[in-house]
Image (cartoon, rainbow, N blue to C red):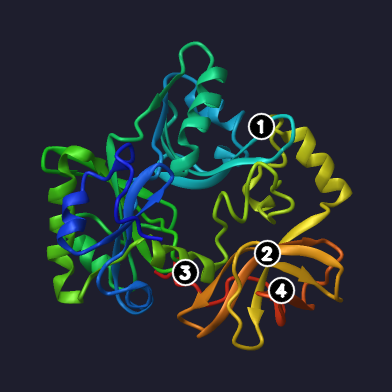
């Protein structure tokens, strides 16, 4: 829900004035006051990204720099994925796991700048916790720096994102999950081929001091392509259509990577990372739950915490994220269910007291374009 009278202690994007001028409705997210939607509305913003191009301010995302001799080795010995699979100039999705339980403290993007410099982008609400854990574990010579409020992050997503980013003067065309650095207004901008929508796109990370100029440059370059500012409401429906998990809903410290089917983000052959022994033992035994996709066979719209069953009164899980898919024109969801439930089963979801039928499917719910050349 948008908050007409937001708490005064919420952090604000360096672009807050730009969003106000565009008529944004704001909501609290991870301790930040961020645009939920603009006057165009969530469905039109969602559709603009799927069919053209949209721009998101996601400056609430965390920013943690790990630097110094041994920085890459330290990150590799703590977070789940294996930086040995990539190299400088590449990005990687990874997990911060609890050492004792193997639960997902946060999911993070790591940007491998060089052997002595890794940029981590956690979720807003978990930035402080990830920073605390890394700081406490850092060896001598490795510095962990919290730069949560120091940078703006803009996501340009959609089929004409290359034209927009290039029009603003930045290099484009590099491979998915790679990044380059470019000068802008006396600062350095990291131009990443990443995103959270399933469409081809870029995320640009720049010092907050040049945030207004960067926003204006991208909006100006995007004008010929009808670029649409999009809020966190559209970001949520877009990521749900792709089956991308949201921390705090689909994954949490009570969820392991095996349950979340995120084993591909774990370097199983690494000798060390937080929670390794726990999640490796679980992997060999088999997780008791699994994250699945659901598609409505009727007109029902699922919402988080709705119960799931195969037969009446035998609860086998619950919806973790649920929404109306603007692309499919039907209800979709992510859900945690017992592992005994077949991957193609039809299940009942308790939608406000009514038993509605949903089909279990493997996400994404729509075809992705994120890796298109």
The dot on residue 237 is 3
Q: For the residue labelled by badge 2, is the local secondary structure a helix, a strand or a loop? A: strand
Q: Residue at x 49, y 64 (%)?
A: 239
Image coordinates for residue 341, horizontal then vertical, percent: 83, 69
Image coordinates for residue 83, horizontal then vertical, percent: 55, 38
The reply to whether dot 3 and dot 4 touch (C-beta < 8 Å) is: no
Q: Earlier in the sequence, mark 3 or mark 2?
A: 3
Q: Earlier in the sequence, mark 4 or mark 1?
A: 1
Q: Are there few (<14), some (14-19), or many (20+) residues within 10 Å of tag 4? A: many
Residue 134 vertical position relative to residue 350 in the rendered view, above or below = above
Q: Give the mark count.
A: 4
**What residue sits right under mark 2 in the picture?**
335
Q: Earlier in the sequence, mark 2 or mark 1?
A: 1
Label 3 to label 1, Cα distance in Å?
Answer: 33 Å
Image coordinates for residue 93, horizontal then vertical, percent: 53, 48
Residue 311 as seen in the image, left or right of residue 135: right
Query: Foreground mark, 3 or 1?
Result: 3
**What residue sits right under mark 4 in the picture?**
350
Q: Are there few (<14), some (14-19), or many (20+) residues within 10 Å of tag 2? A: many
Query: Foreground mark, 2 or 1?
Result: 2
Query: Foreground mark, 4 or 1?
Result: 4
Q: Earlier in the sequence, mark 3 or mark 1?
A: 3
Q: Earlier in the sequence, mark 4 or mark 2?
A: 2
The reply to whether dot 3 and dot 1 touch (C-beta < 8 Å) is: no
**What residue sits right under mark 1 in the picture?**
273
Residue 368 vertical position relative to residue 178 in the rendered view, above or below = below
Q: Residue at x 21, y 66 (%)?
A: 164
Q: Quadrant of the N terminus?
A: bottom left
Query: Foreground mark, 4 or 2?
Result: 4
């Amino acid at each position: 829900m948008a908050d007409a009278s937001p708490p005064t202690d919420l952090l604000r994007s360096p672009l807050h004035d730009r969003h106000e001028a565009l008529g944004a409705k704001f909501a609290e997210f991870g301790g930040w006051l961020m645009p939920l939607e603009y006057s165009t509305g969530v469905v039109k913003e969602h559709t603009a990204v799927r069919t053209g191009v949209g721009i998101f301010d996601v400056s609430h995302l965390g920013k943690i720099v790990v630097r110094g001799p041994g920085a890459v080795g330290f990150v590799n010995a703590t977070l789940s994925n294996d930086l040995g699979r990539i190299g400088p100039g590449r990005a990687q999705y990874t997990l911060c796991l609890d050492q004792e339980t193997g639960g997902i403290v946060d999911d993070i993007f790591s940007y491998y700048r060089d052997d002595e410099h890794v940029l981590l982008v956690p979720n807003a609400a978990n930035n402080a916790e990830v920073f605390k854990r890394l700081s406490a574990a850092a060896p001598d010579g490795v510095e962990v720096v919290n730069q949560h409020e120091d940078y703006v992050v803009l996501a340009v997503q959609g089929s004409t994102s290359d034209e927009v980013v290039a029009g603003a003067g930045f290099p484009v065309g590099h491979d998915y999950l790679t990044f380059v650095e470019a000068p802008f207004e006396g600062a350095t901008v990291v131009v990443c081929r990443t995103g959270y929508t399933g469409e081809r796109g870029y995320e640009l990370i720049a010092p907050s001091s040049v945030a207004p100029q960067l926003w204006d440059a991208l909006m100006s370059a995007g004008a010929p392509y009808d670029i649409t500012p999009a809020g966190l409401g559209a970001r949520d429906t877009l990521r749900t259509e792709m089956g991308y998990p949201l921390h705090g809903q689909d994954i949490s410290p009570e969820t392991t990577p095996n349950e979340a089917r995120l084993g591909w983000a774990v370097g199983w052959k690494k000798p060390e990372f937080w929670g390794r022994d726990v999640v490796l033992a679980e992997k060999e035994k088999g997780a008791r739950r699994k994250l699945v996709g659901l598609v409505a066979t009727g007109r029902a719209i699922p919402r988080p915490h709705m119960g799931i069953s195969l037969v009446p009164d035998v609860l086998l899980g619950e919806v973790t994220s649920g929404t109306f898919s603007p692309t499919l024109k039907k209800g979709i969801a992510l859900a945690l269910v017992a592992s005994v439930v077949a991957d193609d089963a039809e299940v009942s979801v308790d939608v406000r007291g009514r038993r509605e039928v949903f089909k279990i499917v493997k996400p994404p719910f729509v075809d992705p374009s994120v890796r298109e050349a």
